Amino acid sequence: MSKRIMKILSTALVVMLVLGVAGCGQGGTASKEYSPKYPSDTEYKLTVVGTYSNFESLESALERFYVHYPNGEIEYVYLDDYRNTIVQALAGQEPPDIYVVQPWMAGDSKFVSLFEGAEVLSDPALSINIDCIRPGLRWEMENGEIKALSIFATSYGMLVNMDIFEKENLEVPKTFDELKLVCEKLKAAGYASPVMGSNTKTTPGIGYTFAYPIFAKTVKDDRSIEDDLNNLVPSAGEAMRPALTRLKELVDLGCIDVDKCTAEIEDDYNAVIMRFFEGDVPMMLCSGDVVSGTKKRESKSEAFSANPFNYDFYVAPSGDEGGYYMDAMSLLFSVNKNSPNLDMTNEFIRFLTSEEELGLMAQEKRLITPTKDYSLDEVYASLSGFPQERTVNFSDTDILDPAVKEFRAAANAVINGEMTVDEAVAAYGTISGK
């Protein structure tokens, strides 16, 4: 399956768009920070391959790029089974000029060629504005080179029905103690499960979304345990204890009814959003990737269409001093250093790399911008100025996929009563395989 994104703008339309730049502050605006490097009549043909079957935010960015370079075309191709096809695509006879990489590829020998074949985007000669990316989202190789550009960021937390909180005269909780008190009041007001979420072993599931940031913060504070965690050494399971204990406390206090979640939310994406849009869930645990699907589904929900409400995304208040913000990468672009169109490929990446362009792409996808400016999408306004001491980003830890899967399985086992916290800690290294 592929989706072709090709726009060759007429001269008249180009003139119209250029004239509109000065007065338009939204999606039609080309970045004020960007100045074209090559003549406007430069011809080119580029290919981008990725994991999204529908990449509308990239299409919008291309339209803005064509304002500067109308005599070219850029094709986007969605690859099925990306994990197993991207390496072959890059080694093929018609390799892509730009390709998606993701954080889970780190440390996996299968994907070494993706990084070995990537352009060094931090090379000063390319004039790519890496500084507009938040420091924690700059994926530096061991030698300090940056070979992948963060396009979208994500996090883990909860969608909050702001109208419910206003109706019940409550403030959104910031600490775990505040969460307990708020849940007591919400239950007294008739909300059977003040917190809900998907009861799955996946990333957007209850256990991972609520507890993984605590686990990551534990590792950030003592990175000496990383190697043992990544090698699934049983004794390293002790690092899971604080997160699993707090997760168990959330369930035991009745803040979340796991059985109700299981019965009413059948998957970790669409069902989460549609259940939240019913309008009677104060707090819905989820990931930023789930939030990205809300805008399109507002009109698909009869309940939301009939009774719309305000909602925002917040970090889950899991800690004694407050929650932990996982400032995580969602999707990155790498440039094929052997591209026959390398100059224009680098030019497109240079165009993208500004607070405005990356912000517009994130806004359209409703993911978190990788830049320092959260203001474009008010649903993420709570993340602006979040305390650094309770922020965990990509460079703060090096928890590899096997350890992540083990934690997810442990968290799911604990919330479903299949394991005690002690049993999960002791079984580290064997849980995800059960």
Image: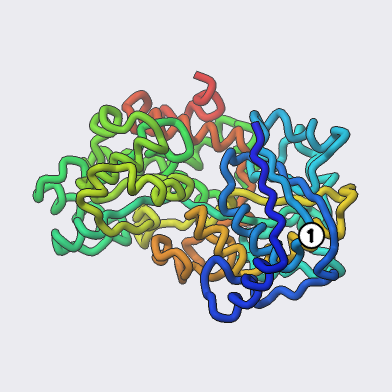
Q: Position of residue 8 (x, y in %)?
A: 71, 56
| Residue 221 can be seen, yes or no | no
Instruction: Identify the residue at image location x=82%, y=59%.
Output: 344
| Residue behind mark 1 | 71
Q: Is residue 98 above or below residue 400?
A: below
Q: Position of residue 126 (x, y in %)?
A: 83, 66
Instruction: Identify the residue at image location x=70%, y=28%.
Output: 84
Residue 121, quarter of the rendered image = bottom right
Residue 100, quarter of the rendered image = top right
Q: Position of residue 167 (x, y in %)?
A: 14, 60
Instruction: Identify the residue at image location x=54%, y=80%.
Output: 23
Q: Nearer the viewer, residue 162 or 432?
A: 162
Q: Nearer the viewer, residue 220 or 126?
A: 126
Helix, strand or loop at disc 1? loop
Label 1 neighbourhood size at 10 Å, few (<14), some (14-19), many (20+)?
A: some
| Residue 59 can be seen, yes or no | yes
Residue type indicated by callout 1: Asn
Residue 245, quarter of the rendered image = top left
Q: Nearer the viewer, residue 70 or 64?
A: 70
